[in-house]
Amino acid sequence: MDPYHSAPALHFNDMFRRYGFPIIALNLIKTKEKSPRESILHPVFEQTVDYLNQFLPADKKIKYVAWDMSRASKSADQDVIGWLEDFADEVLATTGFFHSGREPFINSLRRARNSTEVNRILGRRQSGVVRTNCIDCLDRTNAAQFVIGKRALSYQLYAIGVLSHPSIPFDSDATNLLNGMFHDHGDTIALQYGGSYLVNTMESYQKISPSWKSHSRDLIEAIRRFYSNSFT
């Protein structure tokens, strides 16, 4: 094991160069397992971030967030999508987003409300990015990035005047198109890397499809991935 964490240092340095500060690292690796496998890596990743942060200024430290998404999805009292949407709002409030044009005048009026002073935003710049990982960066990562992307899209559509409020419902054409794009992209990578389609889709995490249907599909894809990884 590299005591200086050279490879992660190069990785995060490249992210700083590309996206600026801050880097928000969302770690979705499991924290508890009956037979520890991926959970072994959880404390190692946290130690790596702690080590790198000691060399960074206070305002440029990596923001580390750990959340066991797999465990949360199996809990009846936890809302996976709700947690991710709240997290996405925090991310966008921190990094902002790029917009090269003036905001619609109506947006500045809404923001001013009863105030007599109206300040129109003439453009926006993004600084920083959210970096998401699970153990193989397929199922959980794809779902989390979709929710973050959906929130970003809603802010972007609001910024150009398409929406009157920065929010897109899940049962909308825009969300369905975006979900389809992420699903196809995830399936393509999963087939190349794991030998199966995505095991858990957004429908699995939303818990809106019949449980027998989503569970049977997830089970078939999990078996297919296990076989591919073990024998091919």
Image (cartoon, rainbow, N blue to C red):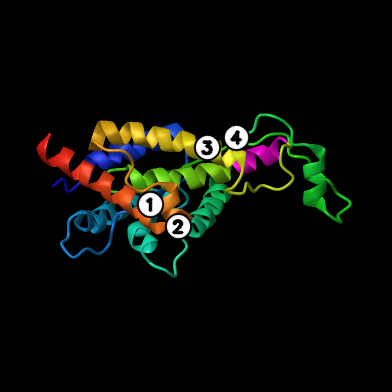
Image position, residue 224 (x, y; %): 22, 42
Image position, residue 199 (x, y; %): 32, 46
Q: Which residues are magenta?
A: 153-160
Spatial separation of the CA atoms under disc 1 and disc 4: 37 Å
Identify which residue is drawn at 54% across, 54% down. Answer: 90
> In the figure, residue 66 lies in which quadrant?
bottom left
Q: Residues within 10 Å of mark 3 (few under 14, many from 20)?
A: some
Spatial separation of the CA atoms under disc 2 and disc 1: 8 Å
Q: Please name the residue that numbered disc 1 is placed on.
A: 214
Report the disc number at residue 207.
Answer: 2
Is residue 80 magenta-colored? no
Mark 3 and 4 residues: CB-CB less than 8 Å, in contact?
Answer: no
Image position, residue 18 (x, y; %): 43, 32
Label 1 or label 4, whichever comes before in sequence order: 4
Q: Is residue 214 above or below residue 190?
A: below
Report the disc number at residue 98.
Answer: 4
- In which quadrant is the C terminus drawn? top left
Label 3 or label 1, whichever comes before in sequence order: 3
Label 3 vs label 4, nearer the camera: 3
Label 2 or label 1, whichever comes before in sequence order: 2
Label 2 or label 4, whichever comes before in sequence order: 4
Q: Please name the residue that numbered disc 3 is placed on.
A: 178
Label 3 or label 2, whichever comes before in sequence order: 3
Most foreground residue, 144 or 61: 144
